[in-house]
Image (spheres, grey):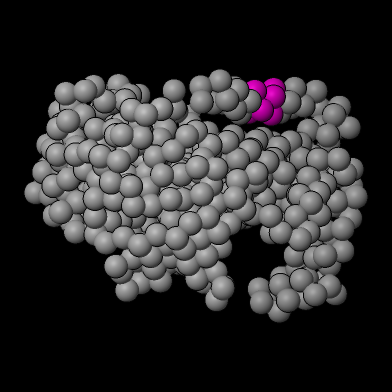
Amino acid sequence: MIESLFISLQLALITTLILLLVSLPLAYVLAFKSFFGRTVLEVFVALPLVLPPTVLGYYVLLLIAPDSLVGSAWSSLFDSSLAFSFSGMVVASVVYSLPFAVQPMQQAFRAIPANWLELGKVQGMNMGQTLRHIILPASKGGVLVAAALSFAHTMGEFGVVLMVGGSIPGETKVASIALFEFVEMQQQTEAAQLALILMGVSFLMLILVYSVNRKPLLGGS
Amino acid sequence: MSQINIQTKLGALNLQGQVNFANEVIIISGENGAGKTSLLRCIAGLQACSGSILVGEKVWLDSAAGFALPTNQRGLGFVWAEEVLLPWLDVAQNIQLGVAQEGKTWFLQVCEQLEISHLLKRKPAMLSTGEAQRVSLARALYRKPSMLLLDEPFSAQAPDIRARLRQVLKDMQQTLAIPLLMISHDAEDAKVLAHQHWRMREGMLMTSVSGTELLAADEHR
């Protein structure tokens, strides 16, 4: 049980870190740029919200299968298979939780007053400096919400990790899958404990999200 | 000698005019919606427009050649009509935003002249409108700009401090030897400061009204 919780935590943490890095440029272009294909990109980011996790898992499996482009490149680089591995689960989790990271950041970016961005230009700042000194400090709350939601959502994954990871004990068997197996084998005590812990983690994450949303970190009047 | 020659359609407004100016103070007046702010924004490069802008030897805009110098390379001092201060930075940090280092002495001098030396550690939320306006002016001056663009910079100042600020701007403009373009409805600003006076009506920019002519015109109305 502890082992599966540890894998879940590890997966959630790594996924959240990667998601913050991946979502930043995505949220940036979606919030500030207009370009051809913008709506399509927005739809792709939002797809995991409505797609059955098994569908997503299926496509990720196709993507990372040993005979696929990504899969074969990975195995020649690292001498291991991406499918049914922890790394494969990370790939799937990043895709699955993408909207939970991108959307809060995108909304926070959009809420920045236009003249704060102009201020960056007027003061001679380049894009990177404006991002560091104006955009990110102004959307601290949104970034925090993105991290909390990505973490909680990854902790709560089931279908995708089952399909891509395959529930290998000690490697890809995460807490939510362990809970399912406890229930199947009628190990009520373990099931109850694990359910309570997962419930607690989600509860804490949402407390964080709602308290951030109440108190606008954006400041202003 | 610098030159602005623009003709551009901004929504319902047809902004046009051709003006020459040296390193001097220019007061811009005109009714609401006449295009004064749009003119400043075009000069700053915050608003796309067609025409040409030449500042000293440097080309800022040549729309016929498809060239526009990015705002962050124009070395501007810009003051918006509304308050634009970053709420999470204190006054000193706001003034130094994006500026590498202009020296402690210069910093203290600017703050003292704008009568904000006692406010340096305060957050913008703790400033009065007038104080916030002077902080914005200090920020524009501190970076030793190549041109000052001020949109009603004294609107929130009491009459006595307004008189002192005029003198400060006059001295600063001479010390920095730069063009200073300032939107103002205060005839006293024109009388004390203006080398040139531009008037705007429905997007049309008209030049070469002396301070006294303006006074006469205003009395006539």
Q: Position of residue B78 (x, y in %)?
A: 35, 47
Question: Viewer-proximal residue, B171 or A196?
Answer: B171
In the figure, is residue A221 to the left or right of B189?
Answer: right
Q: Position of residue A219 (x, y in %)?
A: 44, 28
Q: Which residues are magenta?
A: A196-204
The residue under the point 45% across, 60% down is: B18
Occupied quadrant, residue B3: bottom left
Question: Viewer-proximal residue, A10 or B69?
Answer: B69
Occupied quadrant, residue B162: top left
Instruction: Check the picture and name the quadrant holding the N terminus of chain B.
Output: bottom left
Q: Position of residue A92 (x, y in %)?
A: 76, 53
Residue B164 vs A127, above or below: the answer is above
Q: Is residue A145 visible?
A: yes
Q: Main secondary structure of the magenta part?
A: helix
Total marks shown come to 0
Question: Does residue B39 show up magenta in the picture?
Answer: no
In the figure, is residue B196 to the left or right of A30?
Answer: left
Q: Is residue B91 visible?
A: no
Instruction: Check the picture and name the quadrant holding the C terminus of chain B.
Output: top left
The residue under the point 39% across, 68% down is: B54
